[in-house]
Amino acid sequence: MGTGGGRRVGRPRVAQRPDSGLSPRDELLLAAAELFTTRGYAATTTRAVAERAGMRQASMYHHVAGKEELLAELLESTVTPSLAYARELLADEAAPAGERLWELCRTDVELLCGGPHNLGALYLLPEVRTERFAGFHAVRAELKDAYRQLLAATRAGGALAKSELDLRTDLVFGLIEGVILVHRSDPERPVSVFAEATADAALRIAGV
Amino acid sequence: MGTGGGRRVGRPRVAQRPDSGLSPRDELLLAAAELFTTRGYAATTTRAVAERAGMRQASMYHHVAGKEELLAELLESTVTPSLAYARELLADEAAPAGERLWELCRTDVELLCGGPHNLGALYLLPEVRTERFAGFHAVRAELKDAYRQLLAATRAGGALAKSELDLRTDLVFGLIEGVILVHRSDPERPVSVFAEATADAALRIAGV
């Protein structure tokens, strides 16, 4: 874990990791994901991240500017793939909107719950409210807007007033993000089963 | 904010707070709620909590054992009132189960979103997974079990196999806890409107 070592003289010993085939930057992101979600963001030092990734702290700064950059990139990685997929679904106007909404819900849950670390837990960090994370908030808002557009394109959604459509979008989006909490309480359940059940529930909320 | 002071000699100056009528312990809990949710748990020192509550750090230890005890009590305060109410609802067998489930959802959302601080955000702290917080997890599991029992008492719920009932309970419970995230993105919306809409959505998920 790299926390021992005490008063040993000389350079800090660096953990040897088997060659993962990852770039140094990706090694750092993986290490940060593990440490931020298990020890906490504030409690994790850049040095601990570097050690976990098998490099010295000084080398780390060739690849990333620091802890905030790692957190920003991890947060964005939880929404960017879903947003790209949501844009494809929005463009595919031949398919029924309800089916496209279901598909977005299912894949979004798989993305949020499917990785080795519960990155969704990082959404609620107080640090994430700061301007530094505006990029993440912008992508997340775009993703939510894609949910709104798909919902509005369904027959049930098309009949709603704007405030009601906004509220229902928030409930669907809240369910999807809420699965972060639920998944955590029972991580043994297969993600695919859970993702489909959540998508079904989202359509029931949407009234589709 | 009590962080300045630098090299001033003598005792740290303590912020004077207007007499709130709260006990010292409640002052400390209020201060901890504010600091844990705005600065973060790991980043908040016991000294900062004491100062925010208008007392010296040494005096603080007459009232609480430390930061963990404050966090444990704040976490439990988010579930204990809902559990007490859930027990009343479970005992009230004359009323339709669907109505009782709706009422539990509504009041639970009001409790989670109604306070001045977003205490639900503390659920995802990595520290909360440790044994120290077993009390909170036990109460939360009991509350979830009350949801399950009310759901099972509805006609739709009574027809479900156990694994399906568990899954649906998780989805309802996930929606309720997920509103923590949604509420945070739009804290201006009246909690009462949001709480009723969430309860409606929960019943749609439940199939009631």
Image (spheres, coloured by chain):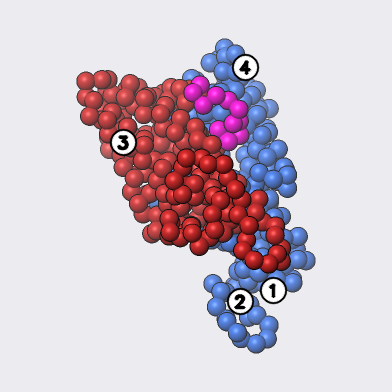
Chain colours: A blue, B red
* Callout 2: SS: loop
* Mark 4, residue position: A162
| Front tag of 4 and 2 | 4
Residue at the farthest right position: A62
Marks 3 and 4, Cα distance to the nearest angstrom?
37 Å
| Dot 1 or dot 4, earlier in sequence | 1
| Label annotation for residue A56 | 1
Marks 3 and 1, Cα distance to the nearest angstrom?
53 Å
| Label annotation for residue B84 | 3
| First to last magenta residue range | B183-193
How many residues crowd mark 1 within 10 Å: few (<14), some (14–19), many (20+)?
many
Q: Residue at x 57, y 81 (%)?
A: A5
Disc 3: which chain? B
| Dot 1 or dot 2, earlier in sequence | 2
| Front tag of 3 and 4 | 3
The stretch drawn in magenta includes residue A180:
no
